[in-house]
Image: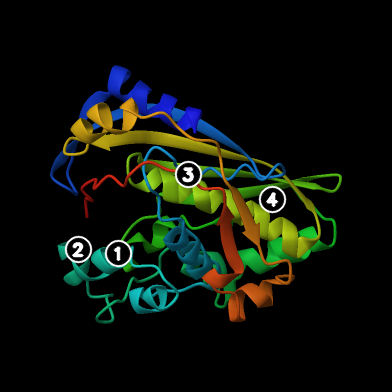
Amino acid sequence: MRQYLDLCQRIVDEGVWVDNKRTGKRCLTVIDAELNYNVGNNEFPLITTRKSFWKAAIAELLGYLRGYDNAADFRAIGCNTWNANANENDAWLNNPHRKGDDDMGRVYGVQGRGWAKPDGGVVDQLAKLVNDLKNGIDDRGEILSFYNPGEFHMGCLRPCMHTHNFSLLGDTLYLTSYQRSCDVPLGLNFNQIQVYVLLALVAQITGHKAGMAYHKIVNAHIYEDQLDLMKNVQLKREPFAAPKLNINPDIKTLEDIETWVTLDDFSVEGYEHHDAIAYPFSV
């Protein structure tokens, strides 16, 4: 929690204003940030200086791991974060590759589970790395990447959290996740949760102990209409201790994640928090 608040304060103190063409708003911005999460000790990085709705973040991750390309599928598992990007983004609404209501195009999990090969067929990156890790293999390329510049025009949004690199040392699994852009007041807690849960889940289904997750952010920013709430509300609150995340131990394979896992298979223990903060969301 303290490292999150330190990043927020750093943006307030050192940030530079940058105009954002997509949203039409200015962002107070810093370059290069890193947060680390101790997954092995079950220190769940859930924001405590405001109420955080962790279930939607896990639901979104499940949708990515299943390769969903439709906001309706995300809604069905408890995640509404893709409604606006799929249905309210003018550029995407006028894109000839859009298939209709709720279509997201070839974004995020679509790339992770079905990266199109130029000679035909697809690459299932997630299945490959899970199979390798389950067999004790780390070829220094156990990577899940959603970033495919050749198909940016076929999706509603370029991925922000774009690459997850797994590393196996002995029987302990580590994760390094890379993010090109981060809305710190709103998006970062979603991203923190997903990095943490991704390592916890992959370690569990591959039979390894979870170690540290390293979260690297290139462009960390606060939108101009979020700044007052950050400075005068959230940064004036004292954090509580980190809660713990419980994951159903019956989740043992990638097929389990693809077929029957729901939000009922996750629970948070000991979550103390301040009141919610209604930060504006930028589409």
Q: Position of residue 276 (x, y in %)?
A: 31, 47
Compared across the picture, whether 244 is left or right of 87 comes to right
The answer to whether 91 appears left or right of 211 in the picture is left
Would residue 118 be seen by someone viewing this image from the given angle? no
Residue in the picture at 49% in, 58% down: 146
Query: Foreground residue, 183 or 57?
Result: 57
Q: Nearer the viewer, mark 4 or mark 3?
A: 3
The Cα atoms of the two marked residues, 2 and 3, are separated by 36 Å
Front label number (1 vs 3): 3
At mark 2, the secondary structure is loop
Q: Nearer the viewer, residue 279 or 97?
A: 279
281 or 236: which is nearer to us? 236
Q: Do the residues labelled 1 and 4 touch (CB within 8 Å)?
A: no
> x and y percent of residue 64 in the render?
49, 66
Q: Name the residue under label 4.
A: 141
Task: Give the Cα separation between the discs numbered 4 and 2.
Answer: 35 Å
Foreground: disc 4 or disc 2: 2
Amino acid carrying label 2: it is Asn
Q: In which quarter of the image is residue 225?
A: top left
> For residue 272, which numbered disc appears in the image?
3
Task: Residue at 51%, 50% (x, y): give it.
Answer: 193
Q: What residue is pinned by disc 1? A: 156
Mark 4 residue element:
loop
Q: Is residue 25 left or right of residue 100?
A: left
Which numbered disc flags the more N-terminal residue, 4 or 2? 2
Marks 4 and 2 close (CB-CB < 8 Å)? no
Q: What is the spatial separation of the Cα atoms under label 1 and label 4, in whole angstroms? A: 28 Å
Indicate the secondary structure of the residue bearing disc 3: loop
- x and y, in percent, of residue 60 in the image: 45, 64
Question: Quadrant of the rendered structure where residue 243 is?
Answer: top right
Q: Mark 2 points at which residue?
A: 89
